[in-house]
Image (spheres, rainbow, N blue to C red):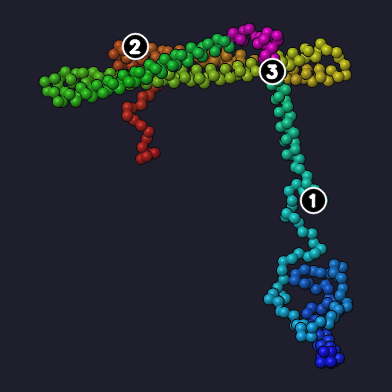
Amino acid sequence: MMANQAPVPANNGMLDDDTFERDLKEMLEDGPALNDMSSPVQGGNVTAQNKPAMNNPPPIYRAQDDSAHLPTRLPQSDIPRSQSMNIPPVSRDIPLSGSQTNGAGANGDFNPKQPLTQQAASKIDLLKTWSINTYKCTKQMLSERLGKGSRTVDLELEAQIEVLRDTQKKYANILRLARALTNHFYHVVQTQRGLGEAFTELSQKSPELQDEFTYNAETQKNLTKNGETLLGAMNFFTSTVNTLCNKTMEDTLSTVKQYEQARLEYDAYRTDVEALNLGPRDSTNIPKIEEANKKFAGCKSKFDRLREDVSVKLKFLEENKVRVMHKQLLLFHNAIAAYFSGNQAGLENTLKQFNIKLKAPNSGGPSWIEK
């Protein structure tokens, strides 16, 4: 079988090698120069320091199969050589998240913002101070209720505060009754208006009783008109009493509540100072005593200031109450007396005296044309 195999000519391999070398040389001549390593390659600047020089040609390997021939030309790329991609140079630093990173230092380390740290610390200090203050005030309040602790009492001021609270309750009762009377009287006026309209209609349909129906219709109409005038006076009275009771007095009572809270804090820190003064004065307790005296001085100044504010507000409230209620009680009396005595002129003069303007019946807001 070995004798039947045809010998392979020796010069066939040499011809293939010469053809491959010639094709490779033409390929290298068509491509970029290998020695010019500083030329841009697809937009990137590659230097000789970043890429090793290629002085030796690549090794040539003989094909194992003579039937398989290597390509003599490289495939042409679809991208033109003049077109460059936006690739930054290798030697340039590429930022990770923009030109300026939030909270990043020079070495890329994260540094928290200083204002946020200070704000968090201030909130923690406020929470700590509030917790200590609440604990001390609660302890003092329980001690007072159980009869184990002492409290600061201003007898004259406390009496005025109790009188104010009792006065507010009584004025609130007057306001409730006045509103009920106004509401009931409003329904009476509406009933009188309906009755007068019914009498007027019957006077037109009953000729034999026309005069009687007409007299009653006129009477109900006059009562309705006077009733609406009286309703204006009653509404003005209730509105003023409501302002006095639920706004003026309530404002003074809110200051009283602040005063009572300041008094509780004052007594709580006073008790702490007294307890620390009874203890030994060593290096451990002296800083505590100084800190307690400092807080006690602050609570005392706040307590004295609010006590003065309460005294001033109580004085002005009493003067305002007397002046306002004198006017309102006079209005209420004159309006009621004039209405039930049938003195229409006196009722109208009373409203003019107190500058009360009545709203016309069935009058609503201005129309869109008037606006």
Does residue 184 appear left or right of residue 55 in this picture? left
Residue shown at the point (72%, 25%) measured from the top left: 129
In the image, taking residue 327 as reference, residue 303 lies left or right, namely right
Q: CA distance from mark 1 to mark 2?
A: 89 Å
The amino acid type of the residue labelled 2 equals Ala
Residue 172 in sight in this render: yes
Which region shows up in magenta? 139-160
Depth order, front residue of 230/83 = 83
Q: What residue sits 39% from the left and 17% below the top? A: 180
Amino acid identity at mark 3: Cys
Placement of the N terminus among the 4 image quadrants: bottom right
Place of residue 147 in the rendered image (x, y in percent of width and height, measured from the top left):
68, 8
Q: Which residue reaches farthest front?
A: 1
Nearer-N-terminus badge (3/1): 1
Q: Earlier in the sequence, mark 1 or mark 2?
A: 1
Residue corresponding to mark 3: 137
Front label number (1 vs 2) = 1
Residue 362 placement, left or right of 124: left
On-image quarter of the C terminus:
top left
Q: Earlier in the sequence, mark 3 or mark 2?
A: 3
- The residue indicated by pointer 1 is 108
Residue 318 x, y percent position in the rendering: 53, 13
Identify residue type, mark 1.
Gly
Judged from the image, the secondary structure of the residue bearing numbered disc 2 is helix
Q: Nearer the viewer, residue 69 or 149?
A: 69
